[in-house]
Structure formats: structure tokens, C-alpha cells
Amino acid sequence: MKTTKGEQTRARILDAALVLFRKHGYERTTMRAVAESAGVSLGNAYYYFESKESLIQAFYGRTHDQHLAACEPILEREKDFRKRLEGVMKAKLQTIAPYHRFAGVLFKTAADPQSPLNPFSDASRPVRQEAKELFGRVFRESNAKAPNKLAEELPDLLWTYHMGIVLYWIHDDSPRARKTQRLVDETIDLIVKLVALSRLPPVRPLVTRALRLVATLRG
Amino acid sequence: MKTTKGEQTRARILDAALVLFRKHGYERTTMRAVAESAGVSLGNAYYYFESKESLIQAFYGRTHDQHLAACEPILEREKDFRKRLEGVMKAKLQTIAPYHRFAGVLFKTAADPQSPLNPFSDASRPVRQEAKELFGRVFRESNAKAPNKLAEELPDLLWTYHMGIVLYWIHDDSPRARKTQRLVDETIDLIVKLVALSRLPPVRPLVTRALRLVATLRG
DNA sequence: GTCTATAACCGGATAGAC
DNA sequence: GTCTATCCGGTTATAGAC
């Protein structure tokens, strides 16, 4: 058996927490209840998770891995840029769908610049880099072309775009997130057209200007 | 004297809170410290503000009023659309500048769809409506023109744009928010050009499509 | 009926023994 | 690694003062 006893206990606590979060919501779930449900003491729960929020970080890691796995077949087989991007975005929405009820609370902590859970923080770097690389592959291994400077920025740009979609989804209460689906359809169409246009000589100065702005903003 | 004793006490508590938030940040400021600094008991502070978060909502109201006041002279005198929008956006950034340190908390609560502090909530409706009306005036009383359908949507669109800028500003750690300034300059240029282009016959189908999407998303 | 105060409750987090 | 005991701060209950 590879997993140590500690790893098992840790997993038991996280499992208990996610069950309770889905059942009662984040705020109404106490750390005492998580500990009891996992069969450990309160202090012991804090030995494995330094705070209640850090349970959320573990949750992120889990859905991120699920998303990567769900994308793999699409990225293997499909070569059309639009379909690849569409596949990855739809997979994302499907992966997070079960958690929409309390997603607001989960992503709430992520929005605080001081918090290590915020997607731009140092603590989130590994997951963020992996996610950007995913979007890099969406374009790079497709049959689409773009000016070099733009191609270099696309992983970051698409990742940022995907964060915006998630932000909209959090506030979207339509059945089956239909409005978000619609937004994704329309914006992907826009992105594909913009990337195609970017190669035309009359458009390139605009692209250059936009990329310079992006570079400044990241600074 | 018009203000009742209660209103004065309320104002004193809010003043004390904002001073402490600026000095130590939101999390590290306790309600006990706010009460003491305002010279009232803890229970009394809760008589005027039902929760610590509701101090944030009061803060919104206050900066909103300051922003309106700061915009008035510009909207009176200036007729050029670009300069009006520029003036209103710069005034916004100046109004909120002193609070950058704890701004993260603002967006944190704002990102939670359940929270009454979220800018899309019912509780925020009055301020939101006033703010949209402000952006309505920026365009309506300027010398710029746009197709009717677009003109109708502009208050909402500009307000949403301004929320996006604030979101970027929250994460912007550059000195004097230089990066946000740059973003505002560039995006205002873009907006002004897009509005001007919107009247050209070849562009109008695109405008129609975009507006239909906006209507769906709000729907 | 408006305002103010004190005491207690609850849950996130920590200290330190084993 | 695991526990018990405790702290700390947001929040509430409630009693009384003006």
C-alpha cells in the first residue's frame, strides 16, 4: 500500500468536508462538523488543513485535475482550433457544474488579492501554469495560425478569457447555465475570427498595439 | 441642527471604521476596536450596523456620493464624449484611491452572488441605478451620436465596463495604479472609436448581433 | 420608541500535552 | 499524529436609560 496513514486521514477529512459543503453549503458547515464526520478531533483537522479556506484550495486542485483528464481525448483527436477551444470550455463548465450551488462562496475567497487562493497568487502558480499550458496546447497543436507575437501571448489571453467566463458563470442562475453556454458560443466565434483576422496586414498594427497594452498591464 | 443624535453616532462609527480599515486593513480591524475608537459600546455599534460587512456597504454609498459630486463640474461644462468619459473614470479612481489597501475585501464580498453587497444584488439596486444613470448622462449630454438601440444600452454597458476597470484596479499593485490608468486610457480610446464606427452601415449588423447577445445575457 | 450597555454564545484558530 | 483546553473576535440576547 503506497498511501501512508497520514494521506488517508487527510483524504478522509477532505471527502467529509466536500460532502458537507454540498449538503449544507460552505458557511453553514463548521470545522467541528467536518472533524466529527471524518472521525478526527478538531485539532487534528487543523493539523492537515491550516484553515477552513484551505479546504477550498484542495477542492480546486481536484476539479482542475478532472478538467485536464476530460480535455485529453479532445486535444488528442481534434485539430480544428474552434472545436478544440469549444471542447475545453464545455469540459470546464461540465466539470464545475455540480458545484454551482455553492460556487459563489468557493470562488469568493479566490477574489481577494491578499488570499493565497486567489488565482493570480504565488500559491496558485502551479495550477495556473498548468492551466495556461492547457490553453497553449489548444492553439499550438491546432491547424490555426497567428503572428508569432500573438501566438506567444495566446496561452495567457485564453486563460484570462476562461477566468472571465467562470466569473460570469458564478452569477448565472439560468437553468443549466444556458446563458453562460450562449456567452461561450458567441465569444469563441469572436475569438476565432479575431485570430484569423490578425494575420491581415491592415489589422496588424492594431494587434501590435493591443499586445503592447497587454505587456504593460502584466508589467 | 438637522442631523439627529443617532445619525451623528452612526457617522462617527463609520468614520472610525474607515480610519481603522485604512490603517490596519479589514480583517485585522475588530468590531471591538471600531466601537472603542468611536466611543461607543460593542452592542451599540451593532445597533447601527447589523454586521461588519454592512460597514462596507456604507463605504460604497459614501464613495459613490463623493464620485457623483466630483463628476458634476465635468458633466456641466464638458461636451466632448471622450473627455466626459475620461473625466468620470479618472474621478472614480481618485475617489477610491485611498482605500486600495483593503479593496480586496470589497471585491471578495462582491464576488459572492448570495451576498447583499454584490453589485448585482437587490440591496445594491439604488446605488447601481444611480451609477448607471451617471454613465447615461456621460453619453446623452455629450456631442457624440450612436444608433438608438446602442444608445439605449450604453448606460448599462459603460457601467459594466467601469466595474471591470475597478476589478483590474483591485489587483493592480503598480505605484499610483499606473497600470490601471494606462488601461483606462487605452480602453476609452477603443470605446470612443467603436461608438463612432457603430453608425457606419457595414458595421451595424455586428452591433445588432452584439446587442442581441447582451440582451440574452441580462435576460 | 430611540438609544446604549453588559454578558454570553458560537465557531475559526492555536497551544501544548501525550 | 492525535488529542483536549483555550483563545479570540463576530454576533446575539437582553436589560435598562433617555
Image (cartoon, coloured by chain):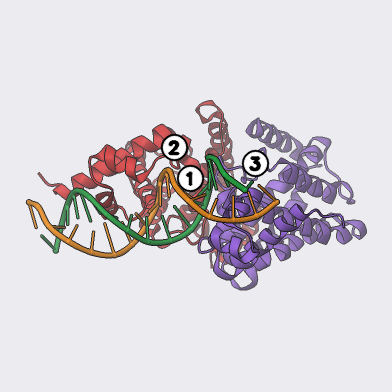
Chain colours: A purple, B red, C green, D orange
Residue B51 lies left or right of residue A148; in this view the side is left
Q: On residue B56, which mark appears?
A: none
Residue A157: image x %, image y %?
A: 72, 44
Task: Kindly indicate whether the residue at mark 1 contacts the one at mark 3 (C-beta within 8 angstroms).
Answer: no
Q: Is residue B48 visible?
A: yes
Looking at the rendered image, the quarter that the N terminus of chain B falls into is top left
Residue at (35% x, 57% y) in the render: B126
Cα separation, mark 2 vs mark 3, equals 20 Å
Q: How many marks?
A: 3
Mark 1, other Cα within 10 Å: few <14 / some 14–19 / many ≥20: many
Asked where in the image residue A93 lies, by quadrant, the reply is bottom right
List the single residue furthest toward the bottom: A175
Residue at (29% x, 39% y) in the render: B15
Name the residue beneath numbered marker 3: A120
Element type where label 3 sits in the image:
loop
Q: On residue B25, which mark appears?
A: 2
The answer to whether tags 3 and 1 share a subunit is no
Provide the chain ID for the residue under circle 1: B
Name the residue beneath numbered marker 1: B105
Residue A98: image x %, image y %?
A: 67, 68
Residue B64: image x %, image y %?
A: 36, 45
